[in-house]
Image (cartoon, helix red, strand yellow):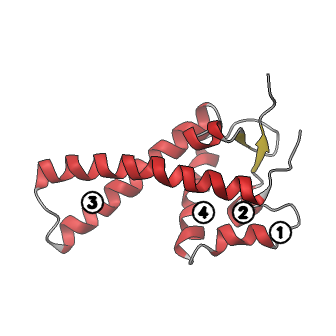
Amino acid sequence: MNHSIGLIRRFAACVYEFLSLLALWLLCTAIFMMLFDIADTSLKRFCLQLLLWLATGAYFIRCWVITGQTLAAQAWKIKLVNQQGETLTIAQAMLRYVFATFSMLGFGLGFLWAFIDKEQLFLHDRLLKTRLIKVRQE
């Protein structure tokens, strides 16, 4: 199994991923506003943020469990695998999403961890023993 995914490729995939997520967030926000009008109260803002976090999680978890690849990972020929080299279980994927959320909330330090990690793993991947690998050309 080839473990060498360069940091440039990894962070380029993150930018691509952000663009995909932006479309998902705009769709969810539009549906939310059609149902509940503008998010003009603290409760509505919280509900919208929760909806966006859950929708994002559903997207990532589904992709990680089914194929190990999101749309951006497919484009960049990257796959997420567990310690056995297999796609993640639902429990592993859910845990990775929660850990990745904390990696991002901590000023992105969990992602920047890859710059100092000997295998260039994100902190949540180091903790969960998951990794990104190159997809073989067929």
Q: In the rendering, at what x and y percent does residue 115 appear?
A: 78, 70
Question: Is 110 situated above or below 92?
Answer: below
Give the crowd class for mark 1: few <14, some 14-19, many >=20 residues within 10 Å. few
Which mark is first along the chain, 2 or 3?
A: 3
Lower sequence index among marks 4 and 2? 4
Circle on res. 117: 1
Q: Position of residue 136 (x, y in %)?
A: 81, 31
The residue that label 3 is drawn on is 48
Q: Is 57 placed left or right of 111 in the picture?
A: left
Residue 33 or residue 101, whichever sits in front? 33
Quarter of the figure that contains the N terminus? top right
Horizontally, is 127 left or right of 20 in the view? right
Give the quadrant of residue 12: bottom right
Query: Who's the residue at 35% across and 52% down the image?
Result: 25
Distance from Cα at disc 4 to Cα at disc 2: 10 Å
Amino acid carrying label 2: it is: Phe
Task: Tell me how far mark 1 sits from mark 4, CA to CA.
Answer: 17 Å
Instruction: Name which of mark 1 and mark 4 comes first in the sequence.
Output: 4
Residue drawn at point x = 38 percent, y = 47 percent? 23
Q: Earlier in the sequence, mark 3 or mark 4?
A: 3
How far apart are labels 2 and 1 at the CA level? 8 Å
Task: Work out which residue is located at the far left of the displayed protein and give it.
Answer: 37
SS for tag 2? loop
Spatial CA span between label 3 and label 2: 28 Å
Q: Mark 4 highlights which residue?
A: 99
